[in-house]
Amino acid sequence: MNLSKSRYCRGIQCPKMLWMDKYMPEKAADLGKEQIFETGNIVGDLAMGYFGPFTEVPYADDKSEMVRRTAELLDSGEENICEASFVSGNLFCAVDILHKNGGGWDIVEVKSSTSLHEIYLHDMAFQCYILTRCGLNIKGVYNLHLNSDYVRHGELDLGELFTLEDCTETVFAMQADVPSNIEAISGYVDGAGENEPVMDISPACEAPYECAYKGWCARHLPSPSVFDISRLTAKKKYELYYEGITGFGEILERRPKLNKNQYRQVETAFYHLPDSIDRQGILDCISEYTYPLYHLDFETTQFAIPPFDGMRPFQQMPFQYSLHVQSAPGAEPEHYEFLGKEGTDPRRALAERLCADIPEDVCVLAYNMGFEKGRIKEMAELFPDLSSHLMSIHDNIRDLMIPFQKQYYYSEKLRGSYSIKYVLPAMCPGDPELDYGALEGVHRGDEASAAFAGLADHTPEEIAAIRKNLLAYCRLDTLAMVKILDKLRELARAE
Ligand code: SF4
């Protein structure tokens, strides 16, 4: 079989992935990796200039054309060749940056992450193996990744934006294992033919990358299984699985060490117990809220390369909020909203509007408040003139998630989760006003994030339609909070 560096790394994680790619690709779940791939491309393109002037080998379906062009560039005295391509037997790789180092070359692998991961070392070891077999004198092997401490001020400083990690020693030490790895991966895929190989699920299904075939390979598990237990680490789930504990019935029989909330999830699901309600607990939480009450929700997006001053790689950038204000418990709320202008830094305008919409010293409600508080604190640091008002909002936020986190209300429908996406349909089933599925274009936070990040690339008509969708989505998030709070009050009052 032909192996590229990405296929080699997939094979290192689990050779069955390559078999599935070949014979059962239709079993792959959509893990929504498109945006991650795009991010990788943007970072890769920018990193090409890290060492100065460079020449890029153009992509061609015919890999031999890329190899031929690379050979020309090697002969021409180029200092930096990007996508430098090599073939050795059935092995192919394109090196992100091949950088001249005296009489030899350095391999530089670019990643859009902010740290070095073990799988990258395998990637680099594979490239080093091929290039050495092609007769190149490899002097160094480096991983070039983003520096999470970099804060943009003016023009991008590539020397500061990226961190160059020397992996030469480790990658050289890994060279001896590459041929046996290649043999094992090829043997596994070719040896199995069309018969699905037997490979049990393992922690390799989760990391370094979540495997899209997990649903298929785990089809022997009961539903629900130990893998559905909320807030249990993958390590612990596999420990239980290896002990032969798969279904909730086995958990109840053998009583492994789980916390109280996890046992409640298991027992409620197994015996189909009715909803459990701790009225006093709910009352204690909601009696902390004072009126007027400001239900607040932010939408944010992230960029690998910080587009604006004061931003770090992958920093969450708030671009929108929705605010429902209730003057008294159960009162009809008033709605306020903000959505930044596409292609601009929305943070200053957002912070100003937030201060105009929310007075100091009022009670603000968020769902999972750590997120909203984090963004407000960042804006307070960025805009000292608004800092005292923003920090007053920050200090007065209460968390609507607490009653669910503490399981003062628990329903089988929550499946152990206290995410609002589970809580809402459990608390307000069938309410057509709260149907995220009926929204157009934007139904989830990640879709909102992607929609705003790419908004400036659309036509004015498309922008108007997407903005409308974003506003409708975010509005629903805070309306959901209003309705959930109404329900909590109802539950706390009920005899
Ligand atoms: S789900 Fe697990 S066993 Fe199946 S192909 Fe993926 S990594 Fe391999």
Image (cartoon, grey):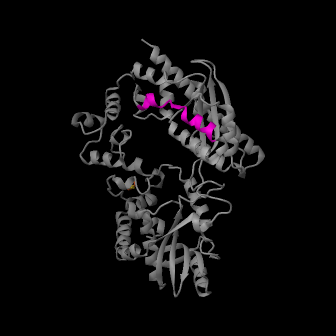
Q: Is residue 390 magenta?
A: yes
Image location (x, y in percent) of residue 248:
30, 35
Vertical order, 453 against 408 (above or below): below
Q: Pick whichever, 175 or 151, lies toward us.
A: 151
Which residue corresponds to the image point at 51% horizontal and 59% vertical from the top-left? Answer: 113
Vertical order, 128 against 359 (above or below): below
Vertical order, 429 against 224 (above or below): above
Q: Pick whichever, 389 or 201, lies toward us.
A: 389
- Asked whether, in this view, residue 320 is left or right of residue 101, the answer is right
Q: Is residue 439 visible?
A: no
Image location (x, y in percent) of residue 214:
40, 50
Image location (x, y in percent) of residue 227:
36, 43
Magenta-colored span? 387-405
Image location (x, y in percent) of residue 200:
31, 53
In which quadrant will I find the N terminus?
Answer: bottom left
Residue 152 image-quadrant placement: bottom right
- Magenta span dominant secondary structure: helix
Which residue corresponds to the image point at 52% horizontal and 64% vertical from the top-left? Answer: 145
Judged from the image, the quadrant occupied by ligand 1 is bottom left
Which residue corresponds to the image point at 35% horizontal and 26% vertical from the top-left? Answer: 272
Q: Pick whichever, 210 or 477, lies toward us.
A: 477
Q: Is residue 176 magenta?
A: no
Which residue corresponds to the image point at 63% horizontal and 48% vertical from the top-left? Answer: 382
